[in-house]
Structures are given as C-alpha cells and as structure tokens.
C-alpha cells in the first residue's frame, strides 16, 4: 500500500523522525485554518500518489492568508496525471540550506536491505543515479544485524553530508531504518531531507510503501486505508478479501495463483481480447471465495464474458465448481462464463458442473481454447 | 536423477495435524514420499493416519533420522522483512541448509518424491526435462503441457513469487546443468525484480543444455502488485519484455504463452 505524503509524515512521526509542523485540509477554509495555526509562510501541497506534483502546479508557497486561499482553491480539484486532488497538506515553510536524499528498500538480488544516501537531494534519485552515480552512497545492511549509530555516522561522512548535518542525520537515519523494518515498509524514502540555516535536519517529504503481508500486525494501518481505492470495483473486491486490479477491457478474469492470472491476461490479449481485470483467488480458495469473485466481476458493466481459469493445487477444483454454482444461485450473472478446469480434483469438479452447462456456462479443455471462446463471446 | 530431493528423502511436515497439512502431507505420502513425521507443538506423541507427530522439529529429526537440510516453505503472505531476516539467519547460522520458497508450490521429482501442494498426477516420471518456476499454478501448467504429450520431468521446482526466495533460478539451473539425466530445462518467470535477467546472464556463460522460457505479465500495468509480493513493475524495471529480451539474448527459446513453451520443449526433446 502506497501512502499519501501526509500519511507518510504521520508514520515517520510515530518513529520520532522530525517533520515540518502541518496538517491536512479538504477545503479552502480548512487550509486557511491550518495555515493560521502553523504560521506563515506555508507550503500548500497536493496529496496524490503520483510523482511530479511540483511541475503540475500541485505545490505552492503562500506568504499570507490571501495566497493560501488562492493556492488551495487552484490545487483542490486539480488533475495531476489522472489523479484528482481531494486533499492538501499545509505545512510551515522551512528555510532550506541544503537538500539531501535518504531511503531504505530491499535489495532483492542480495537479499539484504539497501540504504541510499546522497548529498544531492530534491531531484529525482533516478536522475542522480543516471547522471552522477558517485553522488549516491549505497549501504548494504544485514537484516539480522540491522543499522547502528556508529555505522550511520560513517555513512553520513562517506556520503559527504555537511558537517553541521551529520550527527542529526545519522540519528535520523537510524530512526528511519527502524521505521522501515519495524514499520514493515517496502520503501521508506525522504526526498528532500533538509538542513535548515539554523542547523536542524528534518524530512520535507515522505514516500512510504507498506508491505500488505504485514498488515496483520499493524492495526494502525487501518487509518491509512481511507481513499486507498479510487476504483469502486477495487474497493468492493478488497471488502470481499480478493486480490483484484481493475483494468479497461471486456473479458472478466478469474484465476487461481498470481502467475496463472497474469498469464491469463497475456493469453486473452494474444488472441485479440482485452482483460477487464486481474483477479487471483489465491491458494485454497473455496466456494465462498469463488462466489465473491463472480459477484465483483458481475458488478463491472464493461464485462461481456467471464473467463475462469483454474489449475488446482492447494485449490480444489470441486470446490471451485461448487462456488460457481453457488454464485449463480445468489446473483444473476449477466455475462457468459467460460471455464477451464485442471489439477487437483478436476474430474470431480467437471462432473459437478456437467449437468448445469448451457450457453451461459461453458467449459473448454485448454487455456488457449477457453481464452478464444471468452474473447469471441466478448467481441 | 533428480535435484535436491529423491526417493530416499525423509520428510517432516510441520502443521501435519491441521487441515491443509493433513490433506497435502498425506497426499505426499500416498504419492510415495517418505513422510516420516509431523510437527505440531503440544501434539507430540499423537499420530496422523499412522505418521508420528512431535512437539518440535528437533525431536522429529532425532527420532526419524531426517536431516532437515532442505526446507520447503509453502506458506504465502509472509512479511518481506521476516523473509529477509530468516534467509540471512539461515545463511549465517545453518550454511548447509537450503530453503525453497516461501509462497511456492514445493518440489516434485516424479515417481520419487513430492513435497508440497503439487498434484502428483500431473507430473510424469522418467525425465528428461527439468522445470523451474516462480509461479505455482504456472508450474502445474508447465507439467501438464509436457505430461499430456508423454514428456517426463526429472524434477520440477517452484521457487515462489516472493521478494526473498530461499532458492533462485540460478541455483536450480546450476543443479539441472549438473544432473546427467536432465537434458533440457523449462523456466517460468514473471514480472518484478531482476532474477530472470540474472539467470539469463548465468545461462549465457554456463548452461550447455537447451532452455525454454516463458515470462508472465506482458500485459501487466506498472506500479501494481500482480498478486505475488514480488511481482511488480517499478519504473522501467522488472517488465516481462525486458526479461524476455535478456533471455533471448542468452540463447534461450522464449515463448509467448505456456502452451507455446510446452510445444517448443516437446519439439526439442523429440529431436534429441
């Protein structure tokens, strides 16, 4: 789950990482109230989960109440790369002496954590990596040992952060690492991390991605779920506990396993169709899960046919078959369903469906045959 | 021959007394796997259909002669940080132990040993193909494509779709390269990470046997996790196309879907 900047800053604050004083506002009046509280000048920042806000006019400096009103009015409702701004973050504008970059993420090839630190912050790190790779100091961190203050001190020196910033930055990096690990982040990034003329170091931005697999031990994440889904289909799927991603096509897809679901999208595309969604019902899916999946797909008006692609492993095909029949009892499924069933208990599953097959409930022997049939029905 | 496991491998099933553990553990045993014990804390001394249950792996190892040198973790949904810590702890404290998974279907050497959730009846004994895959269900699909055409497998390894897999493509490719009975390898990748590119590099310099590959997720949108925690296109990295290009450049036969990959492998084996 990607967090909005304001949520990222709230998350940082939980781990003692210094951020600028500020608050969120959903209306111009709220924005004014926050600005009056934190003190001028303030920065008005669009809260969208997409980069390039500044260039799109989504980040503005305001010296007084009139300017706050003007900027909040222009930013709220602004469309930034397809994301409409519904909320702004107002914070006291910091004087900036220097801008740095800091992040922690997983180094997948090495199976360790990777810290990235640069004295050249405030610009996209990908650009720095491209144009001036020596300006980034990489730190490989053993997940068992973690990051201690001594190592962080050597790291900030190696990255050539200004002397005045080093001790505070080292302490902040240890806190950021704790936030990254204990907070179960896939990514914890500060860009820019600033040094003020008066010599304090704090986070001016926050980019945090949380690992959904760890949500069971983070009840506090519930607060971040507001506004998580802009797509109503994804919201409905989430409520039903399904792994769903909405797409633009006409063939509804249900598969068990992420790889097979991805492959199903590819195959539908190859035979001339377009997928309406990605939906992985996961391992061990039972009748209820299958019924819920069909309900979600059925709610998508774009869907003209439904391709159910099941290769049973831990999922048992007889349970899937029962789920399909159960769903048909519960909901009036408008689109025809094409099934391809193989794997664990496939013979039993096909037998369960056999008496119910008709022109709205069809089985095909292979994945390619089923894809072709579903695409033909959708077109 | 098979890689990593064979007909003599003794298997201990953690969670054998649970619903899934019982179903798949006993199914593995019925396949012919030497399932010598189960482990459930607090249920030591009982049995599941004749398989003795122990309170800990340590007790199970002592009583059964299993070595616990190869760990298969089927479980999905494990936090990435837990995986990173566990992997590194294994490497540091138990250097002889190999972990497969997590979030994988397991490993099957047809006719010899099946550990995990793969349906044994879709695999065919006798080789000559080795299979390695990041995706569970696509592993089954690959087995199915070959077995229905009478082409057997030496071993089929599901390495799993998580960000920190205990065993990676290169580990399996190297083992297949060294196995005299494996004549060709089918590799199934997916979007996210750079394991396929690293495998391509390894193949280019080390692999003498033909490799057929399929990479899932050509149509996956960037920035969205496609089910697996590891399957995400971030920026320009991790796309299926980049992986397919790297593999093709390394001399791998790259196919557009699992059926095509199966057909290609069948052609290669029949021409041998």
Image (cartoon, rainbow, N blue to C red):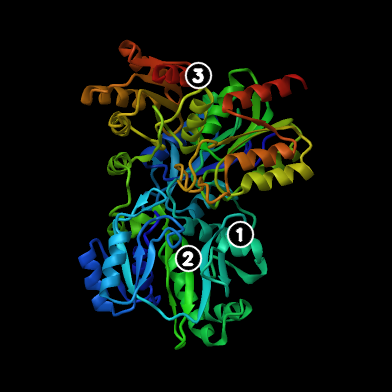
Say left or right for A35 vs B31.
Answer: left
Residue A170: image x %, image y %?
51, 80
Residue A379: image x %, image y %?
41, 19
Say left or right for B126 vs B207.
Answer: left
Calculate the distance from the C-alpha at mark 2 to the C-alpha at mark 1.
Answer: 28 Å
Q: Residues within 10 Å of mark 3 (few under 14, many from 20)?
A: some
- From the image, tell me which residue sits under label 2: A189
Instruction: Name the one closer to the observer, B160 or A59.
Output: A59
Q: Residue at x 67, y 69 (%)?
A: A134
Quadrant location, the N terminus of chain B = top right
**Chain for numbered disc 3:** A
Which mark is nearer the camera, 2 or 1? 2
Residue A4: image x %, image y %?
36, 60
- From the image, tell me which residue sits under label 1: B91
- From the image, tell me which residue sits under label 3: A366
Calculate the distance from the C-alpha at mark 2 to the C-alpha at mark 3.
Answer: 45 Å
Q: Give the number of the disc on residue A242.
A: none
Residue A173 appears in the picture as rendered: yes
């Amino acid at each position: 789950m990607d967090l909005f900047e304001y949520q990222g800053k709230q998350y940082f604050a939980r781990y003692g990482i210094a951020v600028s004083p500020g608050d969120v506002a959903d209306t111009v009046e709220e924005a004014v109230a926050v600005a009056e509280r934190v003190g001028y000048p303030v920065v008005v920042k669009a809260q969208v989960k997409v980069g390039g806000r500044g260039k799109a006019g989504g980040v503005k400096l305001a010296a007084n109440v009139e300017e706050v009103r003007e900027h909040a009015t222009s930013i709220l409702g602004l469309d930034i790369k397809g994301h409409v701004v519904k909320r702004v973050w107002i914070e006291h504008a910091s004087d900036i002496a220097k801008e740095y970059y800091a992040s922690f993420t997983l180094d997948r090839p090495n199976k360790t954590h990777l810290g990235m630190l640069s004295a050249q912050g405030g610009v996209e790190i990908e650009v720095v990596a491209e144009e001036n790779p020596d300006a980034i100091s990489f730190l490989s961190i053993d997940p068992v040992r973690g990051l201690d203050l001594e190592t962080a001190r050597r790291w900030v020196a190696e990255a050539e952060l200004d002397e005045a910033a080093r001790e505070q930055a080292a302490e902040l990096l240890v806190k950021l690492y704790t936030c990254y690990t204990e907070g179960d982040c896939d990514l914890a990034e500060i860009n820019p991390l600033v040094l003020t003329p008066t010599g304090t170091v704090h986070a001016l931005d926050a980019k945090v991605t949380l690992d959904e697999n760890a949500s069971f031990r983070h009840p506090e994440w519930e607060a971040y779920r507001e506004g998580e889904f802009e797509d109503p289909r994804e919201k409905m799927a989430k409520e039903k506990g399904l792994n769903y991603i909405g797409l633009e096509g006409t063939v509804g897809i249900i598969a068990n396993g992420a790889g097979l679901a991805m492959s199903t999208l590819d195959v539908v595309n190859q035979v001339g169709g377009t997928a309406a969604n990605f939906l992985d019902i996961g391992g061990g899916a039972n009748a209820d899960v299958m019924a819920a999946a069909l309900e979600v797909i059925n709610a998508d008006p774009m869907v003209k046919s439904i391709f159910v692609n099941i290769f049973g492993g831990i999922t048992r095909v007889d349970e899937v078959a029962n789920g399909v029949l159960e769903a048909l009892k519960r909901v009036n499924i408008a689109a025809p369903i094409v099934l391809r069933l193989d794997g664990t208990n496939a013979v039993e599953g096909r037998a369960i469906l056999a008496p119910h097959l008709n022109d709205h409930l069809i089985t095909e022997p292979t994945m390619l045959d089923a894809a072709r049939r579903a695409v033909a029905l959708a077109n | 021959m098979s890689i990593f496991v064979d007909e003599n491998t003794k298997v201990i099933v953690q969670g054998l007394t649970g619903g899934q553990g019982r179903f798949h553990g006993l199914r593995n045993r019925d396949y012919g796997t030497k399932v010598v014990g189960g482990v459930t804390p607090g249920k030591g001394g009982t049995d599941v259909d004749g398989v003795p249950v122990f309170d800990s792996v340590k007790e199970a190892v002592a009583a059964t002669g299993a070595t616990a040198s190869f760990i298969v973790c089927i479980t999905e949904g494990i936090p990435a940080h837990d995986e990173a810590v566990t992997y590194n702890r294994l490497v540091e404290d138990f250097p002889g132990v190999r972990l497969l998974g997590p979030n994988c279907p397991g490993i099957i050497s047809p006719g010899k040993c099946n550990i995990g959730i793969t349906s044994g009846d879709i695999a065919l004994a006798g080789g000559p193909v080795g299979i390695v895959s990041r995706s569970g269900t696509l592993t089954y699909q690959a087995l199915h494509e070959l077995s229905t055409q009478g082409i057997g497998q030496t071993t089929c390894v599901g390495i799993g779709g998580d960000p920190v897999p205990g065993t990676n493509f290169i580990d399996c490719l190297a083992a297949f390269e060294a196995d005299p009975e494996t004549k060709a390898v089918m590799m199934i990748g997916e979007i996210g990470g750079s394991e396929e590119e690293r495998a391509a590099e390894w193949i280019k310099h080390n692999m003498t046997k033909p490799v057929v590959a399929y990479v899932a997720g050509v149509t996956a949108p960037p920035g969205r996790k496609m089910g697996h925690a590891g399957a995400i296109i971030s920026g320009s990295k991790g796309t299926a196309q980049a992986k397919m290009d790297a593999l093709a450049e390394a001399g791998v036969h790259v196919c557009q879907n699992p059926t095509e990959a199966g057909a290609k492998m069948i052609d290669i084996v029949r021409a041998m």
